Image (cartoon, helix red, strand yellow):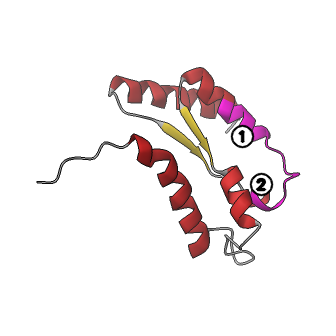
């Protein structure tokens, strides 16, 4: 699938969310190489960020947080595969919750 097709589908999804008054946050999860090799192309990130900006979609790029933590500890199961290990999952959860938590509405206790 070409990136332009992906962005077109993202536009349709964004319109659906707007119609339902649902908040849409695009969370960019970096490729393994983008975490550990800072010379890896960020072209896809740039294109998606621009598309989200033009569509009015919040964009959360996890790359900086993963790069920072990836310098201190291993975050993936590599070389077995490129899924996150427990430390990587904690980093993911922390980055996302730090972004979303300030805007969450807390309900009063019963």
Write the start and end of the magenta stretch as one range. Answer: 35-49
Q: Which residue is mark 2?
A: 34
**What's the residue at 88%, 51% (across, down)?**
39
Q: Which residue is mark 1?
A: 45
Q: Nearer the viewer, residue 67 or 7?
A: 67
The x and y percentages for residue 7 are 61, 30
The x and y percentages for residue 17 are 40, 30
Looking at the image, tell me whether mark 2 or mark 1 is earlier in sequence order.
Answer: 2
The x and y percentages for residue 31 are 71, 55
User: Is 91 on the left or on the right of 72, as rendered?
Assistant: left
Q: Quadrant of residue 51?
A: top right
- Callout 2: 10 Å neighbours few (<14), some, many (20+)? some
> Overall secondary structure of the magenta stretch?
helix
Label 1 residue SS: helix
Q: Nearer the viewer, residue 12 or 55?
A: 55
User: Is 45 on the left or on the right of 7, as rendered?
Assistant: right
**Above or below, comparing residue 36 to residue 40 in the picture:** below
Q: Is residue 85 visible?
A: no
The x and y percentages for residue 88 are 61, 68
Quadrant in which the C terminus appears: bottom left
**What's the residue at 69%, 64% (across, down)?**
69
- Callout 1: 10 Å neighbours few (<14), some, many (20+)? some
Q: Quadrant of residue 81?
A: bottom right
- The residue at the far right in this view is 39
Label number found at residue 63: none
Q: Nearer the viewer, residue 54 or 104?
A: 104
- The residue at the far bottom in this view is 80
Alpha carbon of mark 2 to alpha carbon of mark 1: how far? 10 Å
Quadrant in which the N terminus appears: top right
**What's the residue at 63%, 52% (across, down)?**
29
Label 2 residue SS: helix
Q: Mark 2 near mark 1, Cβ–Cβ under 8 Å?
A: yes
């Amino acid at each position: 699938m070409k990136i332009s097709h992906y962005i077109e589908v993202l536009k349709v999804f964004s319109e659906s969310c707007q119609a339902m008054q649902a908040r849409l946050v695009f969370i960019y999860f970096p490729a393994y190489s983008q975490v550990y090799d800072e010379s890896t192309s960020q072209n896809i990130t740039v294109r998606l960020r621009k598309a989200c900006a033009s569509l009015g979609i919040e964009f959360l790029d996890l790359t900086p947080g993963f790069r920072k933590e990836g310098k201190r500890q291993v975050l993936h199961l590599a070389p077995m595969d490129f899924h996150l290990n427990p430390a990587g999952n904690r980093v993911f959860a922390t980055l996302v919750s730090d972004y979303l938590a300030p805007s969450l509405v807390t309900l009063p206790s019963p």
